Amino acid sequence: MSVVSEVEQRAVGKFLRRMMPLLVLMLLVNNLDRTNVGFIQDELKADIGVSATAYGLGAGLFFIGYALFEVPSNMLLERFGARVWLTRIMITWGLVIVAMSFIHSVPVFYALRFLLGVAEAGFFPGAMLYMTQWLPDASRGRATAIFLGGSAAAGIVTGPITGALLELHGLGGFAGWRWMFVLEGTFSIAVGIAAGFFLVSRIEDARWLSTEEQQALRSAVTEDEQVRSRAPKVSRLRLMIHPQVALLTGAFFAMTLTGYAITFWLPSLIEEIGGLSSFQVGLLSAIPAVCSMIAMYSMSHFTDRAEDRRPYLAITLVLSAIGTYLATLGSPWFGLVAITLAGVGSKCAATLFWPMAQAGLDLRIAAPGLALVNSIGNLGGFVSPFLFGYLKDTTGSTNGGLYTLTAASLLAVIAARYIRGARADTQPTDTAPTPTPAPSPDGDAQRPVVS
C-alpha cells in the first residue's frame, strides 16, 4: 500500500466519522417530516374535512414541488456550498412543517404540502453530490450505504415518534396532530442550525484534515471527476428515449409506487384492526421497516458477490407483487403481514436497483441519466397516494390500489430482464469510447450538463 493511499484512507475515515453522522441525522429527519402526514389521515378528515382523495392528492403534491425544483436546488448547492444550502433546505422545510400546524382548510393543506416539496427539493441529491465532492468512487459506496441507513432507520422511528406526539392531544387545547407538526418542525430547524456550524463545504476548509490529507483527497476526487466527465452536454430528450434509461425509469417508478403507498396508507390500514392507540399504531407501522432493514443488509452481503443481480431483482419484485395482492385478502392482521412482505420486496428491490443502474449506464450518460431516473421515478410518490385516495372514495376500499401495485411490480419484472446489470454486459456497446477531457483552469474536469 502506498503512502498516498494510506493518507487518502485516513482522510476518508475522518470524513466518515465527522460528517456522515450529521448527514444521516438530517436524512432521518427529512424522511420523518415528509411522511408524518400518513399518521393523521383520520384527524385531517375529522377536523378539516379532508377526504381520502384530497388526502392522497395533498400527500402526492409534495413530489410535484420536489421534482420541479430538484435540479435548480442542486445548481444552487454547487454555487453556495453544502454548508449554506443544505442548512437552508432543512431550516426552510422545518418552517413549513411548523406552518402545517395551522392548517384550517383543504386548499391550505394542498399549498403547504406543495411548499414542503419545494423546500425539501434537492436535499437527497444534494447530499449525494456533497459526497462526490469529498470522496473518491472507491470510498463512496461505503458512505452511501451509511447514508441510506438513515432512510431505513426513519421507517423504524417515524411511527413510534409520531404516535407518541399524537398522544399529546388536548394539551393546551391543541389537537395532537398540531403538536406533532410544531415539535417535529422545530426539531428540524434546530438540526438545520446545528448543521450550519458543523458542515464543511470544501476539502480545503476542513481544519481537521492535515495539508497532506487535503491534497491526497482532492487529487483522488479530481481524478474521479475526470473519469466521469465523458460528455460535456446531454439532451434530456435523448436521455428519455435511451432504452436503458427508459427501462430503469419504469422499474424505479414501480418501486416508488409500492414504497410510498405503504408509507402513506399503512397507518390507516393498521387502524382497521381497531382498539389501538396512536402510539400502538405507530409501533405496528414500524414492523415493515424493521423487517425490510434486516432483509436489505442480509441480502446485500450475498448479492454483492453475484455475477448478475437481475434474477434477484426479479425475485424481490415478485415478492412485492405477492405481498400487495395478499393484502387484499383476509383480516387487517393478515394485511399487516402481507404489507410487510411487500415492503421487504420493494426495499430489497431498490437496494439491488441502484448498483445495477450505476453499472448499466455508459459513463457518458450515467450522471444525468441517474438524475432523470430519480426525478421521474419519484413521481410515483405523487401517483400512488392520489390513486389510493381516489379509489377509496369511489369504491370504499383500497383493494383497487393494491391490485395496481401488484400489476406495476410484475411489469417491472419484465423490465428487469432487459436492464444491463451483469458484470459481463456493463461495458458500453452502443457508442465508442470518448477521450477524457482535460481539467478546466480551476483544476476540476467539466461536469456533464443536462440541457
Image: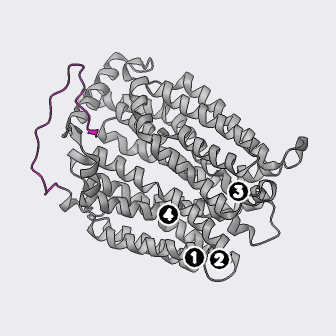
Q: CA distance from mark 2 to mark 4?
A: 20 Å
Residue 89, percent from left and from top: 54, 33
What is the number of the mark on residue 227?
none
Q: Residues within 10 Å of mark 1 (few under 14, many from 20)?
A: some
Q: CA distance from mark 4 to mark 1?
A: 13 Å
Q: Residues within 10 Å of mark 3 (few under 14, many from 20)?
A: many
Q: Looking at the picture, which amino acid does disc 3 mark?
A: Phe
Q: Earlier in the sequence, mark 4 or mark 1?
A: 4
Residue in front for this viewpoint, 168 or 134: 168
Inspect the magenta stretch and tell me whether residue 317 lies in it: no
Inspect the magenta stretch and tell me whether residue 431 lies in it: yes
The reply to whether residue 51 is visible in this rendering is yes
| Residue 84 left/right relative to 106 | left
| Rendered view: 117 above or below 240 | above
The N terminus - image quarter: top left
Q: Looking at the picture, which amino acid does disc 2 mark?
A: Thr
Task: Give the labeled residue for mark 1.
Answer: 400
Q: Looking at the picture, which amino acid does disc 1 mark?
A: Gly
Q: CA distance from mark 1 to mark 3?
A: 21 Å
Task: Give the labeled residue for mark 2.
Answer: 395
Q: Earlier in the sequence, mark 1 or mark 3?
A: 3
| CB-based contact (under 8 Å), mark 2 and mark 1 | yes
Task: Give the labeled residue for mark 4.
Answer: 257
